[in-house]
Amino acid sequence: MTPATLPSDRAPRLPSAAMPGSGCAVARTPAGGSCARWVLQRRCALSPSQLAVCFVALATISAAVATGFWLQGVRIVMLFAGLEMLALGLAFVVHAVHAADGELLSLRGPELVIERREGLRVRHDRIGLEGLRVRQLVDGPIELCAGGRQWVVGRHADGARRRQVLADLCQMVVTRTGADALARN
């Protein structure tokens, strides 16, 4: 079992330097680039093909029951079964559209790139690491602040995954700030 699959009360606790509300700051980036990535998105129990199989199975059962009533002379049941399948199909489409909602954070040289997916829309934001602050809102999403702007990420991820990403981002900040301090001496 990975820490991301554990219930939130059993997830590993962060060191005190990376606890929510402590915040972190990045002064400058070292000359070398790095490529770290963090994915903060919904966790889906079914793959798209499993979801399709589930829909077909439910629709088949509903159609079979409605056909049985049709053969008995109760024709109105077929109308309600059709409405039920239509509503079920719409619910599955809405789920499929939003199943990949979330953010992808990528560290590309002196920038943190946020790719935000919500439904069929994809937005990209670039944040300079100069003056970046990272903190977790009270048992909620992660807030990134730089240059007077704020970005909230991790709304779709579970608490354990947010804590893990927060710890990684704060560790990156501590490492980069320490490297900057060494470079100045």
Image: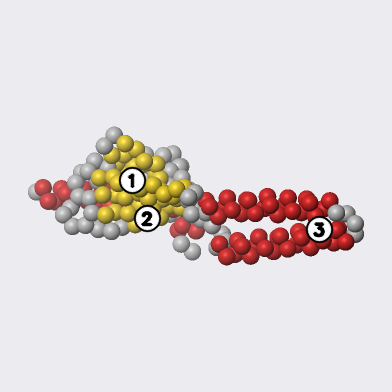
Give the residue pinned by disc 3.
66
Give the residue pinned by disc 1.
125
**Point 82% across, 53% down: residue:** 77
Element assignment for label 1:
strand
Q: Is residue 70 left or right of residue 121?
A: right
**Point 76% across, 60% down: residue:** 63
| Mark 2 or 3: the one toward you | 3
Q: Position of residue 122 (x, y in %)?
A: 41, 49
Relative to 179, is 20 above or below?
above
Q: Position of residue 101 (x, y in %)?
A: 48, 51
Query: Which mark is on residue 43?
Result: none
Q: Earlier in the sequence, mark 3 or mark 1?
A: 3
Going by the picture, which residue comes out furthest to the right?
72
Using the rendered image of the protein, determine whether residue 162 is visible from the camera's viewpoint: no
Task: Give whichever of 104, 171 is nearer the camera.
Answer: 104
Element assignment for label 2:
strand
Give the residue pinned by disc 2.
38
Q: Earlier in the sequence, mark 2 or mark 1?
A: 2
Residues at marks 2 and 1 touching, judged by CB atoms closer than 8 Å? no
Q: Quadrant of residue 141?
A: top left
Q: Is residue 86 left or right of residue 126?
A: right
